[in-house]
Amino acid sequence: MDPGEPIELQILERLNMDLPAQVTLTLPFEQRQKSRLRTRLDSGEEVGLFLPRGTILRHGDRLRANSGLVVEVRAAPETVSTAHTADPLLLARAAYHLGNRHVALQLGPGWLRYQHDHVLDGMVWELGLAVVCEQAPFEPEAGAFGGGHHHGHE
């Protein structure tokens, strides 16, 4: 990819409906937060993202390219820490302490996940949770003012 060369295939819009996708775009969370990005579709074709500032792409989102192509976003596996506990109070305490450090969190029943950090792993372990470093898609909560996951079903 020559950074100075114009990109023919441009993604300009996030769709409000789940149309069938012709291609996929797999990105880690860090890149799904960028509204301007030069990357490649999973098919190998170069593409440029030109989305409104502040757009955060979520697994399953549908995008439309200037050619009319519908693209499905996929969350790439990345290095994350997943902490488990059967104790809901302990899980809440860990989420509170991680949130106090402004750590993006993905929550599930009996577990929470964040981008791997050995210092945070130690803190969470000391709180009493089992922590595993693994490769998994990362889909953190949008936050109280982050808008949430937008999937209109028209």
Image: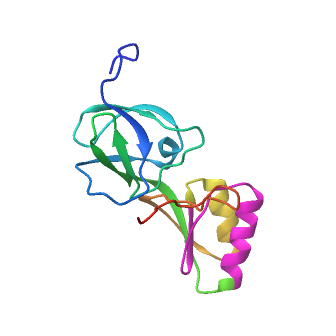
Relative to 63, is 101 on the left or the right? right
Query: Residue 107 at x, y = what percent?
Result: 57, 70
Q: Which residues are magenta?
A: 89-113
Q: Residue at x 59, y 62 (%)?
A: 141
Image quadrant holding the C terminus, namely: bottom left
Vertical order, 42 against 67 (above or below): below
**Residue at the farthest right position:** 100
Q: Tell whether position 107 is magenta.
A: yes
Vertical order, 14 against 17 (above or below): above
Relative to 63, is 90 on the left or the right? right
**Residue at the farthest front position:** 154
Vertical order, 14 against 9 (above or below): below
Q: Tell whether position 150 is magenta.
A: no
Looking at the rendering, which quadrant does residue 153 occupy?
Answer: bottom left
Front residue (pair 21, 99): 21
Image quadrant holding the N terminus, namely: top left
Relative to 5, is 108 on the left or the right? right
Looking at the rendering, which quadrant does residue 5 occupy?
Answer: top left
Query: Residue 12 at x, y = what percent?
Result: 42, 36
Vertical order, 125 against 137 (above or below): below
Query: Residue 99 at x, y = what percent?
Result: 72, 61
Q: Residue at x 53, y 61 (%)?
A: 149
**Total number of numbered labels?**
0
Front residue (pair 147, 59): 147
Q: Residue at x 29, y 40 (%)?
A: 41
Q: Residue at x 62, y 75 (%)?
A: 129
Query: Residue 132 at x, y = what percent?
Result: 50, 66
Coloring basis for residues: rainbow
Front residue (pair 130, 25): 25
